Image: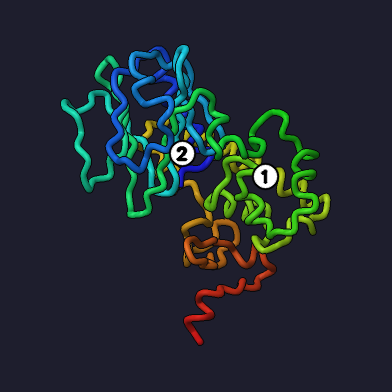
């Protein structure tokens, strides 16, 4: 799933390619992708894109005097830019194409979604706050006013494991499964540690890891074409998605804990005092 760094890079890329351009057509191909009906997608046509913004993992295209096109790419979604879109109107089918935005110049982008879980979401709204997922977002961790004191207040009283707290979009916007693994590895902290149990020093360490990990990931992604962002994300991750590989810090084997629809990766030596965490799914299989 694209997270804060990739969506931030897409925002920069689209700012360079869309702002000042007129929208010719917006073509929903998969019916499931469009989550609103008023205003209609046709309200975007003939309008100029004035800004591209990011709200957590949401992309927001603002138009001159008109509605916003807000997108959440979810787990299998992606944006594919084309300097020249194919001629003709795309037909609904079994392919990954979900929605096409064509500019008056002939360029534009496709929103695609791989896999069978159709969670890619597009909203046409008068105000981004009309999107429920945007309205409930917590603060952006890279915002100038997101200081350590604010971070500590957010975690105070949180009875959840720190991994879950970091992923909660209503608590902190933009961090998902991959970067929460990376942040916790950088902080040398167990993903199962209770958020409310953090000492002031641990809170400081986690805050620094959060800001540094995300800032460095944004820096790696900035300036890349949209098509290269997935590879950059995967190449920059140190533990997430690297089960069985050596930890780049200590050399221990990276391990995994599996859940029903996701998994986390961690280094026992760096994060849990050398003790492997219980993998409940594996334990059930061994019974």
Given the current orientation, which residue lies at the most extreme bottom position? 287
Local crowd size for mark 2, using a 10 Å CA cut-off: few (<14), some (14–19), many (≥20):
many
- Residue 20: image x %, image y %? 40, 12
Residue 96 location (% of width, % of height): 28, 44
Q: Which mark is residue 4?
A: none
Residue at which label 2 appears: 72
Q: Residue at x 42, y 20 (%)?
A: 16
Count how many numbered circles sit on residues in the image: 2
Q: Is residue 204 left or right of residue 43?
A: right
First in residue order: circle 1 vs circle 2: 2
Q: Residue 274, position in %: x, y?
A: 65, 71
Q: Which mark is residue 171?
A: 1
Secondary structure found at label 2: strand
Q: Residue at x 62, y 39 (%)?
A: 136
Could you tell me which secondary element the residue under label 1 belongs to? Answer: loop
Taking the view exactly as shown, the residue that stands out farthest to the left is 88
Q: Is residue 177 left or right of residue 224?
A: right
The residue at the far front in this view is 38
Q: Quadrant of residue 105?
A: top left
Image position, residue 128 (x, y; %): 54, 28
For image coordinates 47% across by 62% down, the residue present is 261
Mark 1 is surrounded, within 10 Å at the Cα level, by few (under 14), some (14 to 19) or many (20 or more) other residues, namely: some
Residue at 74% across, 56% down: 195
CB-based contact (under 8 Å), mark 1 and mark 2: no
Where is 87 relative to 182, above or below? above
Side (left or right) of 69 relative to 218: left
Q: Nearer the viewer, residue 233 or 87?
A: 87
Front residue of this view, candidates 32 and 78: 32
- Cα separation, mark 1 vs mark 2, equals 18 Å
In-front residue for pair 170/252: 170
Does 196 sit above or below residue 214? below
């Amino acid at each position: 799933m694209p997270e804060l760094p990739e969506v931030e890079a897409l925002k920069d890329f689209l700012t360079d390619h869309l702002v000042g351009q007129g929208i010719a057509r917006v073509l929903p191909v998969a019916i499931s992708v469009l989550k609103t009906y008023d205003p209609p997608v046709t309200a975007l046509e003939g309008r100029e894109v004035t800004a591209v913004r990011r709200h957590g993992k949401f992309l927001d295209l603002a138009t001159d005097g008109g509605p916003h096109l807000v997108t959440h790419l979810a787990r299998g979604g992606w944006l594919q830019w084309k300097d020249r879109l194919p001629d003709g109107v795309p037909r609904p089918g079994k392919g990954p194409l979900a929605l096409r935005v064509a500019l008056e110049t002939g360029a534009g982008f496709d929103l695609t979604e791989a896999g069978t879980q159709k969670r890619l979401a597009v909203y046409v709204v008068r105000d981004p706050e009309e999107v429920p997922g945007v309205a409930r977002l917590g603060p952006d961790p890279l915002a100038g006013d997101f200081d350590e004191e604010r971070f500590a207040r957010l975690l105070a009283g949180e009875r959840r494991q720190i991994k879950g707290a970091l992923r909660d979009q209503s608590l902190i916007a933009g961090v998902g499964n991959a970067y929460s693994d990376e942040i916790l590895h950088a902080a040398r902290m167990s993903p199962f540690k209770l958020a409310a149990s953090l000492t002031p020093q641990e809170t400081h360490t986690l805050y620094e890891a959060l800001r540094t990990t995300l800032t460095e990931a944004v820096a790696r992604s900035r300036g890349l074409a949209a098509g290269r962002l997935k590879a950059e994300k995967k190449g920059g991750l140190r533990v997430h998605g690297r089960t069985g590989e050596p930890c780049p810090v200590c050399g221990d084997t990276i391990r995994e804990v599996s859940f029903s629809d996701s998994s986390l990766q961690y280094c026992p030596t760096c994060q849990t005092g050398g003790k492997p965490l219980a993998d409940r799914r594996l334990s059930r299989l061994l019974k």
